[in-house]
Amino acid sequence: MNSSENRILTTHVGSLIRTPEIVELMIRRSLGESVDNADFEHTVASGVRDVVRRQAEVGIDIVDDGEYGKINWITYVAERVKGLERRPIPTAEQGTEEIWPEQRRFGGFYRIYEAHESLLWLPDVPSKARYDGRPAVEFSNVVCAGPLRYDPTALQRDIRNLKAALQGLEVTDAFLPVVAPGSTELVKNLHYRSPEGFLFAMADVLAEEYRAIVDAGFIVQIDDAMLPMQRAILFAGKSLAEYKRWAEVRIEALNRALKGIPPARSRYHICFGSRNAPHTFDPALIDIIDLVLKVNVGAYSIEASNVRHEHEWQIWKDVKLSTGKKIIPGVVGHATNVVEHPELVAQRIQNFASLVGRENVIAGTDCGFSQGWSSARTHPEVQWAKLESLVEGARLASQRLWGR
């Protein structure tokens, strides 16, 4: 993992707001319209080239492709894993999703928020007038209908696009985000005899994706938002011990998928859901950090600017990083349009550096700015302003931490 040997390096969690051209094609696909595959591939490649260049111009050290080729951070696997299928949700089951505790407590908020969330910051494109915000792509439920087998076609495209986009640019490194096996359990299992059977089969399949990314020369980032989130959903009202027994198995599956991956070329990201929502049911980081640190990677990306979690930097007074490990605290938020002042960013970085060592901190964001093509969390102009503030804050912190 990249070390901050003479300054604080910067990165982000990966998913960036899609271009209007990509959004237009995604909306047309979601509406069931035919989209020329060559046109889609060209549009994604062009978008990746521009977004990588923009990151470099802003001053981000460790960049990625913005996840421009993915529908979202979880169900993209349906395009890469044989045995997964999209099936329409039966009419009788639509609208019957389980209500979890925070949605129950803040029902009025969620009714309004969910009605506008997918449309609020979407670019103004021609097909938007016919897209009323219903998550049409999600009505095609992803199910596991047969044995899992990896198809590398889409990943090879992403690798090819990122390599081409990096040509001629000066950046420290590049990464590609992928999903953790445990977070794919939102997929309905109709084939394997047990949840664990599906989980470990998915771990073996995703191991191919992880290895291919590292073999291509990139850092692999494992996204696992569902691990902490399930504490407040699947294990609501249950003991922490019950939750941890469940989570330990998910960590075991992830480490199985990571076998043979050099820790220095891998990092693990958790968050508590990316929405601009109350987050009053989030678990405390101190309750799950032991699980997080069991993942065999070189760096851990955590939320640290979300106002429900910003205070948790203090846990590192007692929690110790293993030698050679790094943390990537989110010192810039992704879910509001308030742009952090660089002085605040610098303070947050310095807080972590004072406890884990300046050389073990890489400055990042809490989460991605758009977990799917239709879930932009801020306006794109704000996204870039936040990344600029991240870079400037890291520069200020570096001056103070290294005395230059």
Image: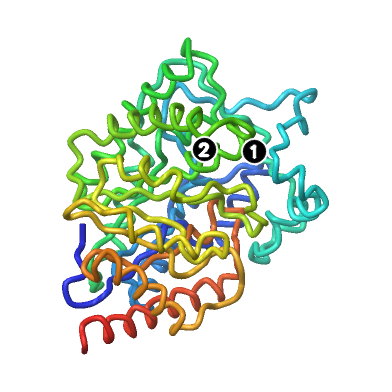
**Res 274 quadrant in image:** bottom right
Q: Identify whether 396 is placed above or below 141.
A: below
Q: Residue at x 75, y 56 (%)?
A: 116
Residue 130 is situated, as x and y percent measured from the top left of the image, at 76, 53
Q: Residues within 10 Å of mark 1 (few under 14, many from 20)?
A: some
Tag shown at residue 380:
none
Q: Residue furthest bottom?
A: 404
Which residue corresponds to mark 1? 138
Query: Which type of secondary structure does the marked residue at label 1 adopt?
Result: helix
Residue 398 is situated, as x and y percent measured from the top left of the image, at 27, 81
**Res 239 quadrant in image:** top right
Q: Residue furthest right?
A: 108
The quadrant of the picture occupied by the N terminus is bottom left
Number of on-image labels: 2
Which residue corresponds to mark 2? 75
Three-letter amino acid code at disc 2?
Answer: Thr
Task: Name which of mark 1 and mark 2 comes first in the sequence.
Answer: 2
Residue 384 is situated, as x and y percent measured from the top left of the image, at 49, 75
Camera-side residue: 171 or 36?
171
Residue 63 is situated, as x and y percent measured from the top left of the image, at 33, 64
Camera-side residue: 165 or 357?
357
Q: Is residue 238 left or right of residue 341?
A: right
**Res 8 quadrant in image:** bottom left
Three-letter amino acid code at disc 1?
Answer: Glu
Tag 1–tag 2 contact (CB < 8 Å): yes
